[in-house]
Amino acid sequence: MNSRTKLLIFALLAAVLFLSTAIISFRLASPAGEQLEQETQPAENRNAVSLIEGSDGLWGAVNANGRVLIEPIWGYLRIMSDSVLIARPSESKSDQIGLLRTNGEQLVPFIYQSIVPVAASNSDLWLAAFTENNKIYYHLYHADGTRWSDKAWDSYSYEEGMLTLESGKCRRKGKLHDQQIEWTEWHTAYPVGLHMLTMDLDEIELKNMPSAEILSDIGETAAAYLRYLFVTKQQPDDTLLSPENSHEICVGSRYESCRLVSADISRIKTLETEGLPSYLVQIQVKYQIMDSKNDLLEKPFYEDRKLQEKYQNQGGILETVQTSMLLTLTRNASGALTYSGFRDSQMYATGIA
């Protein structure tokens, strides 16, 4: 190889090296190059949270890019989701825990002894335990820090994909699905004086029912109405009455000398309306008509002479009535259930109502 050829090769190599260096320098300085570098990161990891331990044993949190979200000032931290952390202010395990947003904002007060996932296969259902009057209760939370419901439960169990919750006379059983519970068994009892309004629903019935929260509201509201009829005699607040139908609802005088024996919600039907949601609640009721000792027998409902003969041998009970009561409830603009209709089938059939 002559000297002229060697010089040509060296010149070509130098040119290639120069161009490569220029391209690399351009990419490092280019904003477009920086954007490309960021986009190579997996999208799902951009907002992921990691915990960091400080030099003094306290904990904080950073995002996937290493940016500090929460300074390491917490005695205990655990990741609940990409947006929520379980936290305890101090290192003492006797202190209560609560929930923080990943920006450091307190989401749930520090009132719980523990917050743990109910099932490894369902990351959206968390159980929070707290103590009140020396008794342990449980709340259910979503992974985003919101409660499934405000109800506090006495006990729970989770076996073979089935969740069972109990509180007093209330018992619910259901299957866990992503972000929801498909209820398969529902038993609830609401006090009405010395007796109860019960709601027993099976899996088939529950499929056609409103949500769990609505069912609970319906049960509470229906029980309050029965307490008005048979216990307190104090009619519902005006804000809970439908003005045009108040004459149908404020009928407590018809039950002045009546005593409730049993009541069971047998059916709930969601009514089709153009406005706010309404529900027809059918309640199977058994009650006794008592001798009031104050002209009870002169009232139209009790004119039957045979009833007057019966009560003397039945401890003052004139008659035991079994009827179907139909109560219509309507959600108002504030979200409360109001009374918009009532009918006692037995009285309706006899022309009293």
Image (spheres, grey):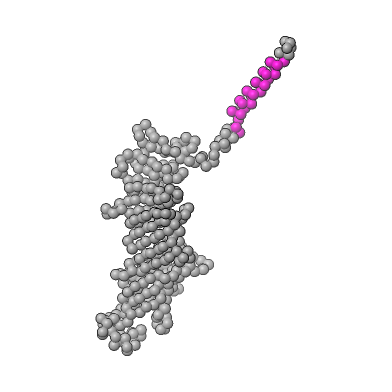
User: What secondary structure is the magenta-colored segment mainly?
Assistant: helix
Image height of 333 relative to 112, above or below: below
Is 302 in front, or is 194?
A: 194
Is 138 in front, or is 25?
A: 138
Residue 37 image point, x, y percent: 57, 34
Image height of 295 relative to 182, above or below: below
Quadrant of residue 72 within the rendered picture? top left
Image height of 341 relative to 112, above or below: below
Identity of the residue drawn at 38% across and 37% down:
59
Q: Is residue 105 visible?
A: no
Residue 140 image point, x, y percent: 39, 53
Q: Which residues are magenta?
A: 8-33
Quadrant of residue 324 within the rendered picture? bottom left
Image height of 71 relative to 165, above or below: above
Of all residues shown, which one is farthest toward the top? 3
Image quarter of the C terminus: bottom left
Identity of the residue drawn at 29% across and 85% down:
310
Is 327 a magenta residue? no
Of all residues shown, which one is farthest toward the front? 160
Is 11 a magenta residue? yes
Q: Is residue 131 visible?
A: yes
Image quarter of the N terminus: top right
Residue 77 image point, x, y percent: 38, 41
Identity of the residue drawn at 64% across and 26% down:
23
Residue 123 image point, x, y percent: 44, 48
Identity of the residue drawn at 70% across and 18% down:
12
Tally of numbered tags: 0
